[in-house]
Each structure stands twice: as C-alpha cells, then as structure tokens.
Image: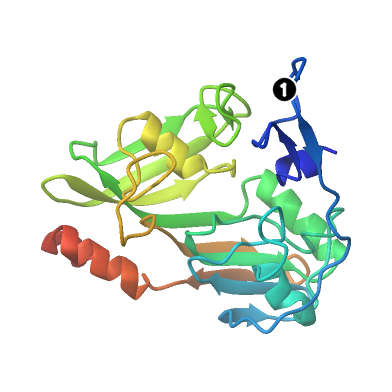
Amino acid sequence: MQRLIAENFLLIDGSKTYPSYRVRGGQRVEARVPEEGISPEEIAVPVLFEDEYVLVVDKPAGLVVHPGAGNPSGTLVNALLNRGIEGGDDPLRPGVVHRLDRDTSGLMVLAKGEPAYSSLVGMMSARRISRVYRAIVEGEGLPRKGTIDSPVGRDPDNPTRMAAGVGKPAVTQFEVLAAAAEHTMLRVRLETGRTHQIRVHLSAIGYPVYADPLYGNPVPGHRLWLHAEQLSFEHPVSREALEFHSEIPEDLQDSATALDGSLALW
C-alpha cells in the first residue's frame, strides 16, 4: 500500500497523498491497482559498462526511471529489461539501486541479480558509492565550498514536494566552479540519496537549480540544469574500482552559454 501511495496510484480528492495523511469526512479516496509485470521496449539508452552483475548507463533527460502512475511504460526499466536487470522486492523497479529525476540526465548503476543488488544497496547506505553532479543555480555569492546538512522528507503541507528540515538525515557538498552576474555553476557531491535532495537543499539556502519547476522558477524552453556527471564504486563481485564520466549534454551547454558566456567555459 505504501508503494501504491508513493507511485500515486492512491489519490485523495484527485490529488497525491502520503502514508500518514489523515482523511476527513466527505473526501473521495480513489485507488487503482497497477498491472503486475512490465514488458521490455525498444528505447535507446547509452550503456557505458556491462557485465553479468552490473550495468552502468547514461540516462537521457526526459526518461522516467521506472513505471508508475502516469508512466506505465516508456521508462528506463522497460528499456533495460532485456539486458537482465534484476534485484529488490519491487517488481516495477528491478535492479534499480538509485534514481534520477525525469529531467535529470546522467549516470546510473543498476544490478543484474539479487546478490549484486544487495551489495550495491549496502554500499549506497554506507556512502561508498560516489555520485557527483553539475548544476547551475540562480544567484551568486556562495562560498567557494560548502556543506548543506539538513534532513529531507515529504513536505507536510504539500505531498507532491519534498522539504528540508523534516524526514531523514541528508548531506550535500558543493563547490563553486564559475560565477556569472546572476547564476553560479556548481559541482555537487551527494553523501546521502534522498528524493530531490540536491534540488531541495539548494533551494533551501536560497539558490534553486536553474529552471526547476518545483523548487525554483520554471523557464520556458529550458529543462532543469542538473546532470549526474561522475559515478564511482567498487564492483560488487570482483571488487575492482570502477569510475565513469558523462559529458554535459548539448542542451545544457547551450543553456549555460545563453545565460552567460563564462559559464560555458566549464
């Protein structure tokens, strides 16, 4: 039931809800049971590394990671089913160790079996998987380096959003790479992996990610300026150190150039 709520299959008066929400008299509760099982689909996804245990991909922007309400198909999971992704208790998220938002591009690792999945999830919890992002935020004046240490959880006033100051511990580190008149380019490193963590943390300190429609200001014709550019971890079986890099996509490069030429140097 919690998964159905999280995936928006259970609605209150037509709106998203959360597990601890208390219903009131007269409200309409609508529950839809999703079809069990998912099918492979021909969707192009760049694969950077693959063996019998793990798969590392460079997720394009606009691609949802796994099926859910409003996205029963056409997801990253559908694209990779034929490559053997597997692991975990959720049949809609086989092998999914961590996620990226729909409009966030970049690197992800998925498991191809329960042993690799359990090992990778354990490494993620122990903060032994390094994930580095590139972001452009609104505003200037940030210190050269900083750490945002604030819990992140479901916004008690709006179940469609996350909020800082509530929920589970979350730590985000950032480093300024370049600053323009009204925008700043950052390298961001996650120590934890809460939903929307980077977006929530940066917005909470007054520097929302550029073109963020949920925690900042939407910009017509531009997507969220956030890209997972580096991923490194120890192979769950061979223990080999693996490191991957993803180039900044062309649309984000064009967006940075349009904002300020100095940001495009990075």
The C terminus: image quadrant: bottom left
Q: In the figure, residue 236 lies in which quadrant?
A: bottom right
Q: Is residue 210 left or right of residue 101?
A: left
- Residue 8 picture location, percent across and down: 71, 44
| Residue beneath the point at 52% across and 43% down | 196
Residue at 75 percent across and 50 percent down: it is 122
Q: Quadrant of residue 17?
A: top right
For the question of whether residue 29 can be seen, the reply is: yes
Q: Position of residue 50 (x, y in %)?
A: 68, 80
Quarter the N terminus occupies: top right
Q: Position of residue 202 (x, y in %)?
A: 38, 38
Mark 1: few/some/many CA within 10 Å (<14, 14-19, 20+): few
| Count of marks overlaid on the render | 1
Residue that badge 1 annotates: 21
Question: Which sits in the foreground, 207 or 22?
Answer: 22
Q: Amino acid at mark 1?
A: Tyr
On screen, residue 144 above or below 236: above
